[in-house]
Amino acid sequence: ALMEVRKMVTRMRGTSLEDEIFRVRQILEAAQIDFILEGDPKLTRISPIVENVVSMCLKEAITNVVRHSNASSCSVVIEPRPTELVVRVRDDGVGIPDLSDCFRGNGLRGMKERLEFVNGSLEIVSNDGTLLVMKVPHVS
């Protein structure tokens, strides 16, 4: 069943990370939040479904920065490693007051579930702002 769902989702029109970074830049500029990008959003070693999941999660992360953080800057770091892709989103905003309760809403919980669907993970650190670390394995 999981293979069938993955095939179906792969056939759906997805969003590339490069396209999502373009939109992220526009959204943060409109919100008057400085944007810093490290790494190349043109991915070559990742499946379309995984790239689509990472793009959707990045969109959700940036939406959270704009809505909740009161940040003045936000950085996205794209780090392809030999066995996985790591994407970090960091803001200098107010942080998350209660990390033990952060998955109660739909946004972060949805990100976590999407990443787990492709055997990835989500880590959240709230210290002088918020850091989200998304990791997804390379699939051959």
Image: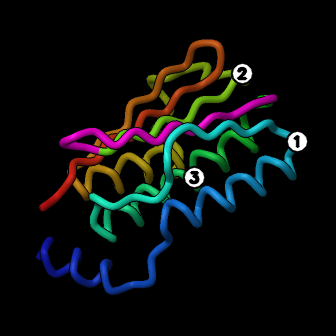
Q: Is residue 66 magenta?
A: no
Name the residue that disc number 1 marks: 32
Does residue 88 sit above or below 130 in this rendering?
A: below
Q: Residue 55: image x %, image y %?
A: 49, 59
Check disc 1 and give the amino acid type. Answer: Gln
Q: Earlier in the sequence, mark 3 or mark 1?
A: 1
Does residue 8 sit above or below 138 in this rendering?
A: below
* Inter-mark Cα distance, 2 to 3: 17 Å
Q: Main secondary structure of the magenta part?
A: strand
Q: Left or right: 66 with respect to 44? A: right
Q: Nearer the viewer, residue 98 or 90?
A: 90
Name the residue that disc number 2 marks: 94
Q: Residue 100: image x %, image y %?
A: 44, 23
Q: Which residues are magenta?
A: 72-84
Does residue 105 sit above or below 42 in this rendering?
A: above
Q: Left or right: 42 with respect to 33? A: left
Q: Nearer the viewer, residue 116 or 30?
A: 30
Q: Earlier in the sequence, mark 2 or mark 3?
A: 3
Of tags 1 and 2, the one toward the viewer is 1
Q: Nearer the viewer, residue 86 or 60?
A: 86
> Which residue is found at the position 39% from the left and 31% from the top?
123
Give the class, few, some or many, for how many residues have Cα within 10 Å of label 1's Cα (few <14, many ≥20): few
Q: Residue 95: image x %, image y %?
A: 64, 22
Q: Left or right: 67 with respect to 132? A: right
Name the residue that disc number 3 marks: 60
Secondary structure found at label 1: loop
Q: Quadrant of the C terminus?
A: bottom left
